[in-house]
Image (cartoon, grey):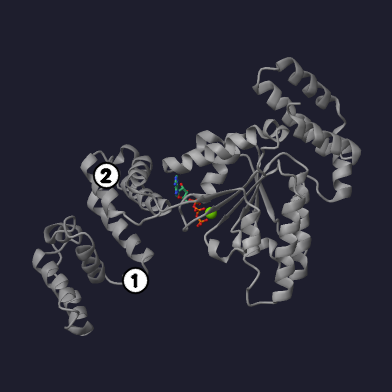
Amino acid sequence: MEHISEVLKILDGALKSNASLAMSYAGLLADKLHDQGDRAQARMIRERLARAPAAVASAQDAERGVSFSSLPVDGESRLHTVDVSQPRSEDIHLVLPNALERRVEDFLSGVRHYDQLARVGAALPNRMLVYGPPGTGKTQLVRWLAAQLNLPLLTVRCDTLVSSLLGQTSRNLRRVFDYAEHRPCVLFLDEFDALAGARGNERDVGELQRVVIALLQNMDALSASTVLVAATNHERLLDAAVWRRFSFNLPMPLPADDARRALWGRFLGTMVSDPQAIEELVAASLGASGALIEQVSLDGKRDAVLKHAGLIDVPGLFRRLGISMALAKGVALSTEEEEMQWLRQWQPQVFTLRALAHLYDTSTRQITNITKEKADGNSEGSDAASRRKSNRTRRK
Ligand SMILES: Nc1ncnc2c1ncn2[C@@H]1O[C@H](COP(=O)(O)OP(=O)(O)OP(=O)(O)O)[C@@H](O)[C@H]1O
Ligand SMILES: [Mg+2]
């Protein structure tokens, strides 16, 4: 039978006197029927739902403490542990390498055809672990998954979930998984290592082990058709038992050349018209994350708009990129001299003496001195550098 998982959930709802569960899944069933062309059946279900007394569902929910209008909160801080959103495909632009795109499609196809696969015993649990360096689009990917599946996204803040009163954490987890079990959704555990990396942490090890065990138990109890995605920057902290629970693993890499080209193009739009400049940005941003490219582009755009310019100033954009790349590498640039020295050795073809002089509104001789000082290993000392700084003649 097609759509057996929705039918089972509706049955669960009826057997557990949980009108809200039954109604949510009946709504999902109607959507699926509608999408595959069974409009008359979809309408029948929707009409029946429209007649259902909503008051019954909300009274039952309130009794159970999992009302959809009242999201689960941390027992101690009263902060919400879950955010609900409904991402839309047209708002999300995701750049993925081909191989990952195919794996994501496989995952989506598995979710969409879960019942059909389950009938022949070939369904994998709808579980995906996304991992990789910060700013590579993990959260963006999960929003995109929810949009593609047309399901609400329940984002769990794992840091809020791990209560300072550790005893609360397992209870918080239970509430969140209960909540997710009661409605069609994508359950998203973001910053997952806050939870799943708990074992082996230096704090109260016994209590933290209980958190991991509670997590594993909750994951095992969640029906395999519920979509669960977790994301982390610290995959090495994850327990092997946690890894095993995910049927799909997706490593998000730093963007390669093609991906960086697409990201620059996307974020700069028509505000940089020179294709050669884009190619140079692609080359110079090797090792940058998508988030860094976005930030530099937006700063450049903002600057252009505030100056009433139609196009972004390209050398200025390179300067922003250079400074962000330095920061990402842990190099602190606190003076303009340090900036110039860094830019010159970072991209000598872009930051010629003349380009730097123009950018910093000074003479090429000054630039030669400053960058030579760097090449000489800062042998002059900081007094000489600061003297020169105050003497520097500005071309006006
Ligand atoms: N591959 C990508 N495709 C599209 N946009 C991206 C990509 N990588 C990063 N971005 C942009 O960078 C921003 C940050 O991305 P996102 O929050 O998804 O990163 P993350 O991997 O979840 O980072 P963190 O590990 O810090 O949570 C987003 O606004 C997104 O627009
Ligand atoms: Mg993220």
Q: Is residue 119 above or below residue 167?
A: above
Residue located farthest toward the left when viewing the structure as drawn: 365
Answer left or right for 9 relative to 376: right
State the mark number for residue 332: 1
**SS for dot 1:** loop
**How far apart are labels 1 and 2 at the CA level?**
26 Å
Which residue corresponds to the image point at 80% horizontal and 31% vertical from the top-left? Answer: 7
Disc 2, SS: helix
Q: Is the C-beta separation of discs 1 and 2 under 8 Å?
A: no
Q: Nearer the viewer, residue 124 or 42?
A: 124
- Looking at numbered disc 1 in the image, what kind of residue is underneath it? Ala
Q: Quadrant of the N terminus?
A: top right
Residue at position x 21%, y 59% from top? 347
Q: Residue at x 52, y 60 (%)?
A: 233
Q: Position of residue 63 (x, y in %)?
A: 89, 48
Q: Quadrant of residue 367?
A: bottom left
User: In this orientation, which residue lies closer to the viewer: 353 or 278?
Assistant: 278
Q: Earlier in the sequence, mark 1 or mark 2?
A: 2
The residue pinned by badge 2 equals: 278
Residue 344 x, y percent position in the rendering? 19, 64
Residue 338: percent from the left, percent from the top? 25, 71
In depth, the one of 386 and 250 nearer the eye is 250
Nearer to us: label 1 or label 2: 2
Residue 109's label in the rendered image is none
Is there any visible trace of residue 209 in the rendered image?
Answer: yes
**Which corner quadrant of the image does residue 190 belong to?**
bottom right
The quarter of the picture where the C terminus appears is bottom left
Residue type marked 2: Ile
Q: Looking at the picture, does residue 231 appear above or below residue 377?
A: above
Label 1 Cα neighbours within 10 Å, binned few <14 / some 14-19 / many ≥20: few
